[in-house]
Image (tube, grey):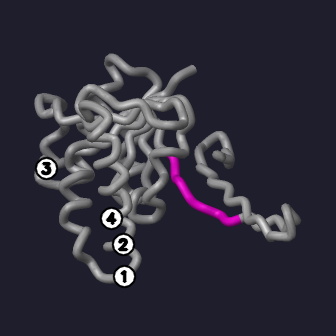
Amino acid sequence: MIKSYVIDTNILIQAPYACQCFEENRVILPLVVLEELDGLKKAEGEKGANARRAIRFLEKLRLKGDLLKGVQMENGGILRVEANCVNVELPESLPEDKPDNRILKVCKGIREEEKPVVLVTKDLVLRLKAQIFGIEAQDFSTEQVIEDLLCGGRQVQRIQEKRRSSEGTLFVR
């Protein structure tokens, strides 16, 4: 079953290649994620470097097609930017000027057409808010698994990704 994964900015700051880890599913970046990446690209250290890596990856996809309609990635998945959920209503206690709430609006807005929708975020409070709205939410973390394999006299390292969800730990290649 094809799923729609809505990716929070903090995932791309931790793992700028994360969009490529969702196999043949739909990967959705809310427009606010692009805005946050733009604000972080000049940051010092790993945070800024990863923001720039993520932006370069998105630029490569933009050159292949329209990001608003969706662009096929090498892994078979489709990545698109979602900018159309402005009319989705949230309770007054969740102001629209907060990026997390704008991400929730995207999740809520697209789940009418694209089921199932999964929010992927490192933000525990955002995962709690998602649950309140009946939106599945998962953590995403990277874990390096180093296997010493001899291949032509060289050491090869294999990196596995894993996502944590209510169903347990899912490994992603």
Which class describes the residues within 10 Å of circle 3: few (<14), some (14-19), or many (20+)? few
Foreground label between 1 and 3: 1
Looking at marks 1 and 3 on the same chain, the residue that comes earlier in the sequence is marked by: 1
Report whether 117 appears left or right of 81: right
Q: In the rendered image, is residue 124 in sight?
A: no
Q: Nearer the viewer, residue 4 or 38?
A: 38
Q: Which residues are magenta?
A: 138-144
Residue 13 is a magenta residue: no
Q: Secondary structure at mark 2?
A: helix
The image quadrant that residue 123 belongs to is bottom left
The image quadrant that residue 10 belongs to is bottom left
Q: In the rendered image, is residue 43 in sight?
A: yes
> Which residue carries the number 3 mark?
95
The residue lying at 33 percent from left, 17 percent from top is 113
Quadrant where the N terminus lies?
Answer: top right
Q: CA distance from mark 3 to mark 4?
A: 26 Å
The residue lying at 28 percent from left, 31 percent from top is 65
Task: Tell me residue 68's x, y (percent).
Answer: 23, 31
Question: How many marks can you see?
Answer: 4
Q: Is residue 145 above or below residue 133?
A: below
Looking at marks 3 and 4 on the same chain, the residue that comes earlier in the sequence is marked by: 4
